Image (cartoon, rainbow, N blue to C red):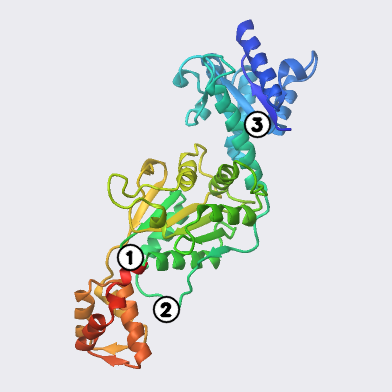
Amino acid sequence: MTSLFISYGHEGPAHVEWVETLARQLQRDGFGVVLDRWHCGPGEPLPQFMETSIRTCDFVLVICTPAYKAQSDQRSGGIGYESNVMTAEVLVDRKMRKFIPVLRIGSWADAAPSWLRGNLYIDLRKGDLDSNEYRQLIRALQRNEATSAATQRPAPERDLLFGYPNESHPWQGREHELAELERIWSEGRVRVLAITGIGGEGKTALARRFVGSLRNQTHKGSKPVLLWWSLYRSGSVSELLRQVNEYLGFDVSPGNPSFEDVIVTQLAAAMVDGVAGRPVVLVLDGFEVVQEQGGHGDGHIRSQTLRKLLLDVLNDNQPRSANAGLILATTRQHIAGLPKDLGYETLALGRLSNAEGAALIEARGVQCDPDELSRFVEEIGAHCLTLTIAGALLADSGTMRTSLAELREIVRREASVTCASSLY
């Protein structure tokens, strides 16, 4: 049974009675409630009771009022002592989710202790325990319970790589973009990142290069848990969630009517807090498959399940964990409807430089006059996929020395090259 400790101020009979009423209702809803008036008898050491209850209970409800705030901020009385214990857990163990603020009296600005000011809260100022607000509290407790279970499971020993592309030829170009990806990852500020660009511009190749580097290194002492899902190969979100359920050991029955909601909740928790002390990186390759194309809805996510996952990760109000992960989407367009101020960013891929484009062809062993090759790259807009295919066709034909005229003829002759951007 999930245990709760209620931290509150003794601010008169009516307030104390309401707290007891809340505690009884929580008991009826299946939670084990620890309350000083019930569990600490006369003569017992109150500081020890408070410290033990806070440290051992799964969650702490903080009943916020202006009087509670004053004692908490000034570290006076029993509330001041409890605040010291709670803030120590937040600082040392980063257990911010454990502490759920409940606004009972006054405005949030007037009632929130300083250490809780930045958190979302449950508004029970009306006192109605048969309200949407109270049900929101129950959902928050249930979600945090699922979060705790999700992040404490053992981390998988292998990576989940569905549709992970092979690197068939040496990496060329995009060094600046790769460095930017690695900077974003190391800073840990971004939670959802979209690599955007036209088809064939190298989005998947860049993501693959980044993930490849993560597979061969550690992040703050822990190798990330890596999930790669190609939406080109399977656009089924249900199948993605079934694989995640098995891979991360969530053990949710597929027959559960709320299967997708439960998996999304637990996966979002894993993205925010990590799994067994390891950050999680989820790559959704080909995200445009699940986006609206054109019109007023252009760029919006068609899948409500994926939309909920991304928003849950972005809207999580807890301080960023040292084990926080990253959702990386490759797509032809900006993902509409995601709040940038909460950790969503885009990395737009432009054209390659002429030198980078030439290197793509030369990597196949093909030789050409540098000036002619530079002109060819310029003519086709330094498009990654077109240059890669042109180099491959020349190499396959045994034409290891070529000219501008021959390069032009390849592009003209091979319809698959000229429309290649529509394939990716």
Q: Position of residue 216 (x, y in %)?
A: 55, 68
Which quarter of the figure has residue 247?
bottom right
Residue 59: numbered disc: 3
Cα separation, mark 1 vs mark 3, equals 48 Å
First-in-chain label (2 vs 3)? 3
First-in-chain label (2 vs 1)? 2
Can residue 413 be seen by looking at this rendering? yes
Which quarter of the figure has residue 134?
top right
Which amino acid type corresponds to the residue marked 2 in the rendered image? Answer: Pro
How would you rate the neighbour count of disc 3 (Cα within 10 Å): few for under 14, some for 14-19, many for 20 or more? many
Q: Quadrant of the C terminus?
A: bottom left
Name the residue at 32% across, 45% down: 297
Which quarter of the figure has residue 262?
top right
Which amino acid type corresponds to the residue marked 1 in the rendered image? Answer: Gly
Q: Is residue 56 above or below residue 227?
A: above
- Helix, strand or loop under label 3: strand
Q: Where is residue 377 in the image (x, y as percent from the top left)?
A: 23, 77
Of 24 and 393, which appears nearest the observer? 393
Q: Mark 2 points at which residue?
A: 170
Residue 199: numbered disc: 1
Cα separation, mark 2 vs mark 1, equals 21 Å
Relative horizontal placement of residue 368, taking residue 51 as reference (left or right): left
First-in-chain label (1 vs 3)? 3
Q: In which quarter of the image is the N terminus?
A: top right
Which amino acid type corresponds to the residue marked 3 in the rendered image? Answer: Phe
- Helix, strand or loop under label 2: loop
Q: Is residue 365 above or below residue 142?
A: below
How would you rate the neighbour count of disc 2 (Cα within 10 Å): few for under 14, some for 14-19, many for 20 or more? few
Name the residue at 62% across, 52% down: 245
